[in-house]
Image: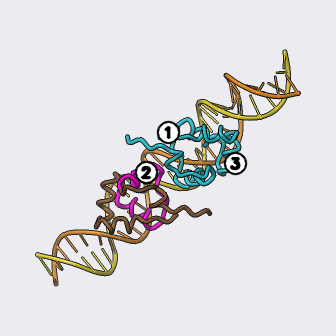
Chain colours: A cyan, B brown, C orange, D yellow
Amino acid sequence: MKNRLKVLRAERDMTQAQLADLLAVSRQTINAIEKGKFDPSLPLAFKASKLFETSIEQIFLFEEN
Amino acid sequence: MKNRLKVLRAERDMTQAQLADLLAVSRQTINAIEKGKFDPSLPLAFKASKLFETSIEQIFLFEEN
DNA sequence: TATTTGTGTAAAGTTTTATTTACATTATAT
DNA sequence: ATATAATGTAAATAAAACTTTACACAAATA
């Protein structure tokens, strides 16, 4: 699963730590998701979509397999 | 998190077991999600959205707290 | 009545997501 | 040049999602 978190952060001049705070997760979690180490939970994906005022589908790109 | 899986199934005359098969999870997982015992993973939410040809947001209703 | 089908649930175990602590590296600023 | 901020990563642990097996119950059906 790819995602646009890094770009969305950059557009808002936001650090991983700031995003982590806003989403109430650890900085390492944000880093791991950005680097594709694992997928966020659905609740976390929803929180990100609300924060960035867009849909989950516009942030996370699902790829089968 | 609420969801419309039961209705989406009913509209298609689909059992929990059939949906589980199509999403490649166990019947108990579908049941647990429908009953709100836990949230699906993001990949599973995506699979459901593709299967029902709609968005994640139209299937799963996020509620803070 | 007996059987089958669909659903609800529970316990034990595995896998995945997320945390905490910690340290290394890169870039920026003083 | 040195300090500071931001990022990458790793190991150990905790929490959540998911599996497997198993059983109970209600409704439909043979």
Q: Which residues are magenta?
A: B26-51
Does residue B27 show up magenta in the picture?
yes
Give how far across and how far down residue C2 sits, in percent: 16, 78
Real-space Cα separation, disc 1 to disc 2, in angstroms: 13 Å
Q: From the viewer's perspective, tell me whether residue A46 is left or right of residue C16.
A: right
> What residue sits right under mark 3 in the picture?
A21
Mark 1, other Cα within 10 Å: few <14 / some 14–19 / many ≥20: some
> Which secondary structure lies at badge 1?
strand
Q: Do the numbered discs 3 and 2 sit on residues whose CB atoms are within 8 Å?
A: no
Specify the amino acid type for callout 3: Asp
- Which label was assigned to residue B46? 2
The 10 Å Cα crowd at callout 2, few under 14, some 14 to 19, many 20 or more, is many
Where does label 1 land, which residue? A2
**Looking at the picture, how far across and down is residue C28, in whole percent?**
76, 27
In front here: D5 or B50? B50
How far is disc 3 from disc 1 in space, using C-alphas? 22 Å
